[in-house]
Image (spheres, helix red, strand yellow):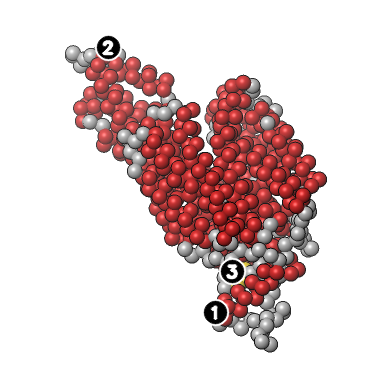
């Protein structure tokens, strides 16, 4: 009878491009029901305050800018948080594999709460930006380690329903966050937008300190300081380049090209150094061998696409609703609500289905297919669209988004040995954040390049003759559609032009007619720019749909004994297919 030699198959040997789960020495520990439930309550509370923080702050930012008089630094309130919370995500994931989830998770929560208190006490824009970056350093630990904690507490088959619930928390916060932020700002001070994190966070902190088990940690701890520095030196200029390109600087400007070149050099250095670390059996921040795992590499690619296409398109939908349809900023949030509700429902539903059936690939395929359909519905939007057209697209897109929130994390955790769950999970979050930043930059450039030609083409020849070129230049930016006060001023200027600039027989009615034609051309230009964005998103989602078919499926384990059994079975079958002779038979 053929058996597998225990020496012939190391615990982390990649099998057929898929790193097999580690055997008995690293099997998932069992925790009491009380420990499990209380830990998950703490995790969900932490996730709620982290996701609420983002949506609440965005609503309060105009009041913050007015109070601290820092309009010139408006974007940096969000950019500083984004940079800090993205670049250190893989570092936290690796540290949680080394030291265990609990100390790193608690460290992140403490940093986040401290940053929240400092933000609420900020007396200038420079202070607020610095404190937001500090807060982002804490937030970076929350989401990836929350998913990793789920991976530690539950068997792969059980993880689906819990990770679906964690994903649904983000949808819930997106629904209540803007409303709560507006209510706090109108009835109190914007500082409570940050202070509100403290009571929720303190409760979660005490729950985690006293009731959360220690979970795993590596026996040998060697921190890769050089790898961490190289990663930060690569990610920061890369994110800054995509953030500034096309807005603050031209894409081919020396500043942007310099940032990208520096990021490339640091990125190559990071990869080479991590390969050296892994060859020497040390502890790299991100094991390069992970990318030889087909499940991880395909999932990372799809997460980048989801971040780039799905979240990027969602970012521009409020612009369409407010600019083209003419819905107010407050009511545009109502239009977005169906998407958020359906994403919550589908996230929970996907988790339950995976938990019951033990398979995840078909859920991933269905989710991507629904997302493609939602993107195609966005492509159909035009200058004559109404709120119901957008809502229909939002409903479909929300279902696809919910299916995609946690499936790939589940697949990666199922394919990696337990001591690599932290870095694998955090890497997916990192790639999704990078994709989101790249997508926003690319889409902004697409819109800007398409708007002006479309605007000029939509202008009637009679309007071009009647209105001086310098006056038409004020419409070179579609932002005029979002500023009701500026629109009224320009309308009055068209109806009552300065003396000496009108033609004989000019009437206010004619001025109003010309103004309406110009504004219609602005809408046509913006519609074309947004259409190009939505088409780009559809193309990327189609690529993601193709990529998901390359996602290898390993049946989700239910019991501890499944681990060793699956390693043996998958190892024999897949190594035999590849003609590998590293398995010893007796």
> Which residue is farthest right?
210
For label 2, count other residues whose C-alpha is less than 10 Å away and answer few (under 14), some (14-19) or many (20+): few
Residue at point 45% right, 42% down? Answer: 395
**Residue labelled with disc 2:** 499
Up-down: is 493 above or below 302?
above
**Front residue of 147 and 111:** 147
Mark 3 or mark 2, which has the lower sequence index?
3
Residue 18, numbered circle: 3
Q: Which residue carries the number 1 mark?
A: 578
Query: Is any atom of residue 138 visible in this view?
Result: no
| Residue 547 in the image, given as x and y percentages of width and height | 46, 61
Q: Residues within 10 Å of mark 3 (few under 14, many from 20)?
A: many
Helix, strand or loop at label 2? It is: loop
Residue 500 appears in the figure? yes
8 is higher (above) or lower (below) than 271 = below
Residue 293 percent location from the top left of the image: 58, 66
| Residue at (79, 63) in percent of width and height | 219
Please tell me whether residue 567 is drawn above or below residue 429 in the rendered image.
below
Q: Position of residue 29 (x, y in %)?
A: 75, 61
Instruction: Tell me the CA gap for discs 2 and 1.
Output: 85 Å
Quadrant of the drawing holding the C terminus? bottom right
Q: Where does the image place residue 310, in percent across and percent down from the top left?
A: 47, 47
Q: Sequence-wise, which precedes: disc 2 or disc 1?
A: 2
Q: CA distance from mark 3 to mark 1?
A: 13 Å
- Residue at image x 37%, y 31%? 325
């Amino acid at each position: 009878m053929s058996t597998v030699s225990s020496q012939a198959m190391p615990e982390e040997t990649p099998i057929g491009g898929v790193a097999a789960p580690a055997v008995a020495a690293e099997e998932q520990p069992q925790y009491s029901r009380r420990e499990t439930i209380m830990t998950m309550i703490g995790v969900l509370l932490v996730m709620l305050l982290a996701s609420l923080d983002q949506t609440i702050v965005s609503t309060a930012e105009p009041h913050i800018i007015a109070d601290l008089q820092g309009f010139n630094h408006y974007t940096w309130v969000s950019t500083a948080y984004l940079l800090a919370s993205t670049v250190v995500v893989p570092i936290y994931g690796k540290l949680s594999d080394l030291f265990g989830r609990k100390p790193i998770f608690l460290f992140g929560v403490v940093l986040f709460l401290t940053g929240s208190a400092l933000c609420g006490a900020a007396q200038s824009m420079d202070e607020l930006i610095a404190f937001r970056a500090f807060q982002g350093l804490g937030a970076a630990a929350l989401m990836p380690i929350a998913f990793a904690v789920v991976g530690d507490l539950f068997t792969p088959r059980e993880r689906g329903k819990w990770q679906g619930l964690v994903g649904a928390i983000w949808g819930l916060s997106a629904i209540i966050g803007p409303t709560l932020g507006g209510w706090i700002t109108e009835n109190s001070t914007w500082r409570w937008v940050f202070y509100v994190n403290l009571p929720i966070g303190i409760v979660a902190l005490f729950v985690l300190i006293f009731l959360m088990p220690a979970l795993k940690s590596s026996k040998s701890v060697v921190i890769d300081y050089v790898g961490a520095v190289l990663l930060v030196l690569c990610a920061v200029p890369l994110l800054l380049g995509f953030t500034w390109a096309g807005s603050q600087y031209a894409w081919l400007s020396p500043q942007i090209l310099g940032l990208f070149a520096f990021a490339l050099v640091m990125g190559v250095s990071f990869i080479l150094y991590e390969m050296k670390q892994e060859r020497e059996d040390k502890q790299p921040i991100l094991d390069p061998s992970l990318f030889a795992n087909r499940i991880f590499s395909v999932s990372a690619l799809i997460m980048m696409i989801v971040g780039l296409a799905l979240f990027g398109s969602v970012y521009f939908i409020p612009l369409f609703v407010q600019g083209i349809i003419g819905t107010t900023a407050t009511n545009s949030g109502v239009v977005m609500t169906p998407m958020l509700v359906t994403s919550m429902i589908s996230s929970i539903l996907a988790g339950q289905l995976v938990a019951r059936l033990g398979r995840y690939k078909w859920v991933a395929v269905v989710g991507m297919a629904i997302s493609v359909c939602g993107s195609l519905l966005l492509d159909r939007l035009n200058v004559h669209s109404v709120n119901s057209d957008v809502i229909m697209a939002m409903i479909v897109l929300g279902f696809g988004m919910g299916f995609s929130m946690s499936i790939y994390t589940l697949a990666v955790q199922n394919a990696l040995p337990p001591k690599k769950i932290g870095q694998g999970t955090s890497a997916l979050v990192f790639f999704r954040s990078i994709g989101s930043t790249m997508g926003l930059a690319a889409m902004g450039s697409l819109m800007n390049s398409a708007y002006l030609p479309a605007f000029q083409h939509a202008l009637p020849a009679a309007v071009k003759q009647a209105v001086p070129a310098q006056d038409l230049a004020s419409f070179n930016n579609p932002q005029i559609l979002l500023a009701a006060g500026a629109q009224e001023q320009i309308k009055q200027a068209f109806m009552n032009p300065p003396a000496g600039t009108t033609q004989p027989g000019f009437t206010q009615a004619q001025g109003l007619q010309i103004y309406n034609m110009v504004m219609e051309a602005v809408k046509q230009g913006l519609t074309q720019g947004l259409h190009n964005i939505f088409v780009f998103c559809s193309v990327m989602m189609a690529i993601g749909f193709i990529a998901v078919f390359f996602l290898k499926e390993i049946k989700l384990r239910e019991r501890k004994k499944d681990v060793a059994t699956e390693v043996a079975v998958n190892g024999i079958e897949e190594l035999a297919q590849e003609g590998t002779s590293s398995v010893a038979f007796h």
